[in-house]
Amino acid sequence: MKRNCPNTQCHSPKIIKYGHYFRHNDSRRIQRFKCMACSKQFSTSTGTLEFGQKKRRVNYLLMKLFAAKVSQRRAAKIAGVNKVTVQRKFDYWSKKAAIKNKRFREKLSASKARHIQFDDLITKEKTKLKPLSITVVCDADRRYILYASPCQISSFGHLSELSKKKYGPRKSFYNENLEHVFQTIKSTIASTALIESDEHKNYKPMVNQYFPLSTYLQYKSERGCIAGQGELKKAIYDPLYGINHTLAMLRDGISTLVRRTWCTTQDPVRLKGHLEIFTYYYNQIYLGGLPSG
Ligand SMILES: [Zn+2]
Protein backbone atom coordinates (compact mmCIF):
# COMPACT_ATOMS: atom_id res chain seq x y z
CA MET A 1 0.00 0.00 0.00
CA LYS A 2 1.34 3.42 -0.98
CA ARG A 3 1.45 5.77 1.99
CA ASN A 4 1.57 9.51 2.23
CA CYS A 5 2.35 11.62 5.27
CA PRO A 6 -0.76 11.70 7.52
CA ASN A 7 -0.10 15.36 8.41
CA THR A 8 -3.03 17.10 6.70
CA GLN A 9 -0.95 20.18 5.84
CA CYS A 10 1.86 18.07 4.37
CA HIS A 11 0.63 14.87 2.72
CA SER A 12 4.07 14.38 1.17
CA PRO A 13 4.80 11.03 -0.55
CA LYS A 14 8.44 11.23 0.61
CA ILE A 15 8.39 8.93 3.62
CA ILE A 16 11.00 6.50 4.94
CA LYS A 17 10.81 3.46 7.19
CA TYR A 18 11.88 4.51 10.65
CA GLY A 19 12.20 1.47 12.92
CA HIS A 20 9.59 -0.65 14.66
CA TYR A 21 7.83 -0.95 17.95
CA PHE A 22 6.34 -3.97 19.64
CA ARG A 23 2.65 -3.59 20.41
CA HIS A 24 2.05 -5.63 23.55
CA ASN A 25 -1.74 -5.78 23.49
CA ASP A 26 -1.82 -7.93 20.36
CA SER A 27 1.86 -9.02 20.18
CA ARG A 28 2.62 -7.45 16.82
CA ARG A 29 5.69 -5.70 15.48
CA ILE A 30 4.51 -2.40 14.06
CA GLN A 31 6.38 -0.49 11.35
CA ARG A 32 7.14 3.15 12.02
CA PHE A 33 7.61 5.78 9.30
CA LYS A 34 9.03 9.27 9.12
CA CYS A 35 8.08 12.01 6.71
CA MET A 36 11.12 13.59 5.03
CA ALA A 37 9.27 16.84 4.39
CA CYS A 38 7.81 17.70 7.81
CA SER A 39 9.71 15.04 9.84
CA LYS A 40 6.50 13.79 11.47
CA GLN A 41 6.69 10.19 12.69
CA PHE A 42 3.81 7.76 12.35
CA SER A 43 3.05 4.04 12.05
CA THR A 44 0.84 1.59 10.18
CA SER A 45 -1.83 2.11 12.83
CA THR A 46 -2.02 5.90 12.41
CA GLY A 47 -5.34 6.98 10.94
CA THR A 48 -7.07 3.60 11.35
CA LEU A 49 -10.30 3.17 13.32
CA GLU A 50 -8.31 1.00 15.76
CA PHE A 51 -5.74 3.73 16.51
CA GLY A 52 -5.11 4.02 20.25
CA GLN A 53 -7.09 0.90 21.17
CA LYS A 54 -5.59 -1.00 24.09
CA LYS A 55 -7.60 -4.22 23.88
CA ARG A 56 -7.45 -5.23 20.23
CA ARG A 57 -7.43 -8.92 21.07
CA VAL A 58 -11.12 -8.87 22.01
CA ASN A 59 -12.35 -6.94 18.95
CA TYR A 60 -13.30 -9.94 16.84
CA LEU A 61 -14.81 -11.93 19.70
CA LEU A 62 -16.95 -8.98 20.78
CA MET A 63 -18.20 -8.42 17.23
CA LYS A 64 -19.38 -12.04 17.07
CA LEU A 65 -21.04 -11.70 20.48
CA PHE A 66 -22.85 -8.52 19.38
CA ALA A 67 -24.29 -10.55 16.49
CA ALA A 68 -25.25 -13.46 18.76
CA LYS A 69 -28.03 -12.17 21.00
CA VAL A 70 -25.61 -11.51 23.85
CA SER A 71 -26.20 -8.44 26.02
CA GLN A 72 -23.32 -5.99 26.50
CA ARG A 73 -23.09 -6.91 30.17
CA ARG A 74 -22.76 -10.61 29.33
CA ALA A 75 -20.32 -9.86 26.51
CA ALA A 76 -18.10 -8.08 29.05
CA LYS A 77 -18.14 -11.18 31.28
CA ILE A 78 -17.35 -13.55 28.40
CA ALA A 79 -14.53 -11.42 26.97
CA GLY A 80 -13.14 -10.61 30.41
CA VAL A 81 -13.19 -6.85 29.91
CA ASN A 82 -14.90 -3.91 31.57
CA LYS A 83 -18.39 -2.95 30.41
CA VAL A 84 -17.14 0.50 29.43
CA THR A 85 -14.68 -1.21 27.08
CA VAL A 86 -17.60 -3.16 25.61
CA GLN A 87 -19.55 0.07 25.03
CA ARG A 88 -16.55 1.61 23.25
CA LYS A 89 -16.04 -1.51 21.15
CA PHE A 90 -19.72 -1.46 20.22
CA ASP A 91 -19.39 2.11 18.93
CA TYR A 92 -16.15 1.19 17.14
CA TRP A 93 -17.78 -1.82 15.44
CA SER A 94 -20.85 0.23 14.51
CA LYS A 95 -18.60 2.58 12.54
CA LYS A 96 -16.37 -0.13 11.12
CA ALA A 97 -19.28 -2.35 10.06
CA ALA A 98 -21.05 0.58 8.37
CA ILE A 99 -17.91 1.23 6.30
CA LYS A 100 -17.51 -2.48 5.46
CA ASN A 101 -21.18 -2.78 4.50
CA LYS A 102 -20.92 0.24 2.24
CA ARG A 103 -17.89 -1.33 0.53
CA PHE A 104 -19.78 -4.60 0.21
CA ARG A 105 -22.63 -2.80 -1.57
CA GLU A 106 -20.10 -1.12 -3.87
CA LYS A 107 -18.70 -4.56 -4.76
CA LEU A 108 -22.23 -5.84 -5.32
CA SER A 109 -22.81 -3.17 -7.95
CA ALA A 110 -20.50 -5.29 -10.14
CA SER A 111 -22.68 -8.40 -9.62
CA LYS A 112 -26.12 -6.97 -9.03
CA ALA A 113 -28.97 -8.76 -7.30
CA ARG A 114 -31.58 -10.17 -9.69
CA HIS A 115 -34.15 -11.17 -7.10
CA ILE A 116 -34.83 -9.15 -3.95
CA GLN A 117 -37.42 -9.17 -1.20
CA PHE A 118 -38.13 -6.53 1.42
CA ASP A 119 -40.26 -5.98 4.50
CA ASP A 120 -40.50 -4.05 7.76
CA LEU A 121 -39.81 -5.35 11.22
CA ILE A 122 -41.53 -3.60 14.12
CA THR A 123 -39.73 -3.11 17.41
CA LYS A 124 -39.68 -0.52 20.18
CA GLU A 125 -37.62 2.10 21.93
CA LYS A 126 -37.79 1.31 25.68
CA THR A 127 -41.60 0.95 25.63
CA LYS A 128 -44.24 -0.36 23.23
CA LEU A 129 -45.63 3.16 23.23
CA LYS A 130 -42.58 4.25 21.21
CA PRO A 131 -42.49 1.92 18.22
CA LEU A 132 -39.68 1.71 15.69
CA SER A 133 -39.73 0.20 12.23
CA ILE A 134 -36.77 -1.41 10.47
CA THR A 135 -36.93 -1.69 6.70
CA VAL A 136 -34.90 -4.70 5.56
CA VAL A 137 -33.97 -5.64 1.98
CA CYS A 138 -32.39 -8.98 1.15
CA ASP A 139 -31.01 -10.69 -1.93
CA ALA A 140 -33.43 -13.61 -2.14
CA ASP A 141 -31.06 -15.84 -4.15
CA ARG A 142 -27.73 -15.18 -2.42
CA ARG A 143 -29.30 -14.35 0.97
CA TYR A 144 -27.27 -11.18 1.61
CA ILE A 145 -28.82 -8.41 3.67
CA LEU A 146 -28.53 -5.46 1.30
CA TYR A 147 -29.57 -2.93 3.90
CA ALA A 148 -31.43 -2.67 7.21
CA SER A 149 -32.44 0.81 8.35
CA PRO A 150 -34.44 1.72 11.47
CA CYS A 151 -36.69 4.74 12.01
CA GLN A 152 -39.21 6.13 14.45
CA ILE A 153 -42.88 5.53 13.61
CA SER A 154 -46.00 6.84 15.34
CA SER A 155 -47.74 4.41 17.64
CA PHE A 156 -50.64 2.44 16.23
CA GLY A 157 -53.59 0.28 17.26
CA HIS A 158 -54.94 0.24 20.80
CA LEU A 159 -51.78 1.88 22.20
CA SER A 160 -51.89 5.07 20.13
CA GLU A 161 -54.23 6.98 22.52
CA LEU A 162 -52.15 6.10 25.58
CA SER A 163 -48.91 6.92 23.76
CA LYS A 164 -50.18 10.38 22.81
CA LYS A 165 -51.31 11.06 26.38
CA LYS A 166 -48.02 9.97 27.92
CA TYR A 167 -45.39 11.11 25.41
CA GLY A 168 -47.21 13.59 23.17
CA PRO A 169 -47.58 13.23 19.41
CA ARG A 170 -44.95 10.98 17.84
CA LYS A 171 -43.87 11.77 14.31
CA SER A 172 -43.39 9.01 11.78
CA PHE A 173 -40.31 9.00 9.55
CA TYR A 174 -41.41 5.87 7.76
CA ASN A 175 -41.59 7.30 4.24
CA GLU A 176 -38.30 9.19 4.52
CA ASN A 177 -36.64 6.00 5.71
CA LEU A 178 -38.13 3.90 2.89
CA GLU A 179 -36.84 6.44 0.39
CA HIS A 180 -33.39 6.40 2.06
CA VAL A 181 -33.32 2.59 1.84
CA PHE A 182 -34.17 2.57 -1.86
CA GLN A 183 -31.56 5.24 -2.58
CA THR A 184 -28.92 3.23 -0.71
CA ILE A 185 -29.59 -0.09 -2.46
CA LYS A 186 -30.42 1.19 -5.94
CA SER A 187 -26.93 0.55 -7.37
CA THR A 188 -26.83 -3.04 -6.06
CA ILE A 189 -29.95 -4.22 -7.89
CA ALA A 190 -30.40 -5.03 -11.56
CA SER A 191 -32.95 -2.73 -13.21
CA THR A 192 -34.95 -5.73 -14.47
CA ALA A 193 -34.83 -7.59 -11.13
CA LEU A 194 -37.70 -9.54 -9.62
CA ILE A 195 -38.86 -7.65 -6.53
CA GLU A 196 -41.22 -9.18 -3.98
CA SER A 197 -42.90 -7.95 -0.79
CA ASP A 198 -46.18 -8.08 1.08
CA GLU A 199 -49.10 -5.80 0.27
CA HIS A 200 -48.09 -2.73 2.30
CA LYS A 201 -49.62 0.27 0.53
CA ASN A 202 -46.50 2.50 0.58
CA TYR A 203 -44.33 0.00 -1.28
CA LYS A 204 -45.66 0.13 -4.81
CA PRO A 205 -45.06 3.82 -5.58
CA MET A 206 -41.51 3.53 -4.24
CA VAL A 207 -40.71 0.43 -6.33
CA ASN A 208 -42.19 2.06 -9.44
CA GLN A 209 -40.14 5.19 -8.86
CA TYR A 210 -36.78 3.46 -8.29
CA PHE A 211 -37.13 0.31 -10.38
CA PRO A 212 -39.60 1.10 -13.19
CA LEU A 213 -38.33 -1.84 -15.31
CA SER A 214 -38.55 -4.44 -12.55
CA THR A 215 -41.14 -7.18 -12.13
CA TYR A 216 -42.90 -6.42 -8.84
CA LEU A 217 -45.00 -9.06 -7.06
CA GLN A 218 -46.93 -8.48 -3.84
CA TYR A 219 -48.27 -11.28 -1.63
CA LYS A 220 -50.91 -11.38 1.07
CA SER A 221 -49.20 -11.81 4.43
CA GLU A 222 -49.60 -15.04 6.44
CA ARG A 223 -49.73 -15.65 10.17
CA GLY A 224 -46.65 -16.86 12.02
CA CYS A 225 -46.44 -20.53 13.03
CA ILE A 226 -44.64 -20.20 16.38
CA ALA A 227 -45.89 -17.74 18.98
CA GLY A 228 -43.42 -14.86 19.09
CA GLN A 229 -41.81 -15.85 15.80
CA GLY A 230 -44.13 -13.94 13.49
CA GLU A 231 -41.61 -14.12 10.69
CA LEU A 232 -41.65 -17.91 10.30
CA LYS A 233 -44.84 -18.72 8.44
CA LYS A 234 -47.23 -21.63 8.72
CA ALA A 235 -47.90 -21.94 5.00
CA ILE A 236 -46.16 -24.93 3.43
CA TYR A 237 -44.82 -22.73 0.67
CA ASP A 238 -44.00 -19.18 1.73
CA PRO A 239 -43.26 -17.03 -1.32
CA LEU A 240 -41.50 -14.51 0.91
CA TYR A 241 -39.39 -17.13 2.70
CA GLY A 242 -36.12 -15.29 1.94
CA ILE A 243 -37.02 -12.03 3.66
CA ASN A 244 -39.00 -13.72 6.44
CA HIS A 245 -36.04 -15.92 7.26
CA THR A 246 -33.76 -12.88 7.27
CA LEU A 247 -36.08 -11.04 9.68
CA ALA A 248 -36.15 -14.11 11.92
CA MET A 249 -32.32 -14.19 11.85
CA LEU A 250 -32.26 -10.50 12.85
CA ARG A 251 -34.65 -11.12 15.74
CA ASP A 252 -32.59 -14.10 16.81
CA GLY A 253 -29.22 -12.40 16.41
CA ILE A 254 -29.78 -8.97 17.94
CA SER A 255 -30.42 -8.96 21.67
CA THR A 256 -32.67 -5.91 21.60
CA LEU A 257 -34.92 -7.29 18.84
CA VAL A 258 -35.83 -10.51 20.64
CA ARG A 259 -39.51 -10.36 21.57
CA ARG A 260 -40.45 -10.32 25.28
CA THR A 261 -36.91 -9.51 26.31
CA TRP A 262 -35.23 -7.65 29.13
CA CYS A 263 -32.91 -6.03 26.65
CA THR A 264 -34.81 -3.28 24.88
CA THR A 265 -33.39 -0.69 22.54
CA GLN A 266 -32.42 2.34 24.59
CA ASP A 267 -31.41 4.49 21.70
CA PRO A 268 -32.34 4.29 17.98
CA VAL A 269 -28.81 5.40 17.01
CA ARG A 270 -27.38 2.37 18.82
CA LEU A 271 -29.93 0.17 17.07
CA LYS A 272 -28.69 1.45 13.72
CA GLY A 273 -25.14 0.52 14.73
CA HIS A 274 -26.28 -2.90 15.89
CA LEU A 275 -27.97 -3.55 12.55
CA GLU A 276 -24.75 -2.59 10.74
CA ILE A 277 -22.76 -5.01 12.92
CA PHE A 278 -25.23 -7.83 12.35
CA THR A 279 -25.37 -7.16 8.60
CA TYR A 280 -21.57 -7.28 8.42
CA TYR A 281 -21.43 -10.49 10.44
CA TYR A 282 -24.22 -12.15 8.46
CA ASN A 283 -23.01 -11.23 4.96
CA GLN A 284 -19.28 -11.60 5.38
CA ILE A 285 -18.76 -14.18 8.12
CA TYR A 286 -21.92 -16.29 8.33
CA LEU A 287 -22.46 -16.38 4.54
CA GLY A 288 -18.74 -16.04 3.74
CA GLY A 289 -18.96 -12.82 1.69
CA LEU A 290 -18.88 -12.48 -2.09
CA PRO A 291 -17.12 -15.30 -3.95
CA SER A 292 -13.81 -13.89 -5.20
CA GLY A 293 -13.05 -13.45 -8.88
ZN1 LIG B 1 4.86 15.29 6.31
Image (tube, grey):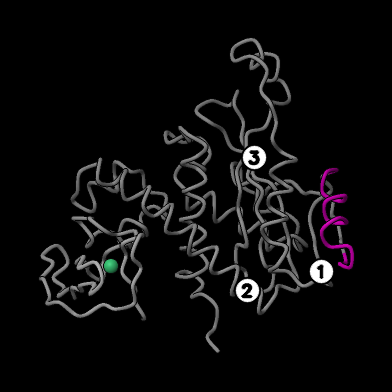
- Residue farthest bottom in this picture: 293
> Mark number for residue 133?
3
Residue 201: quarter of image: top right
Q: Is residue 186 left or right of residue 107?
A: right
Mark 3 residue crowding within 10 angstroms, few (<14) / some (14–19) / many (20+)? many
Q: Residue at x 69, y 49 (%)?
A: 180
What residue is shown with label 1? 194
Q: Amino acid at mark 2?
A: Leu
> Mark number for residue 221?
none
Q: Secondary structure at mark 3?
A: strand
Q: Residue at x 19, y 80 (%)?
A: 17
Q: Is residue 218 above or below residue 128?
A: below
Q: Residue at x 22, y 62 (%)?
A: 57
Q: Are marks 3 and 2 in contact (CB under 8 Å)?
A: no
Q: Is residue 37 left or right of residue 109?
A: left
User: Which numbered disc, 1 or 2, marks the residue closer to the eye?
Assistant: 2
* Magenta extent: 201-215
Which quarter of the rendered picture does the N terminus lie within? Answer: bottom left
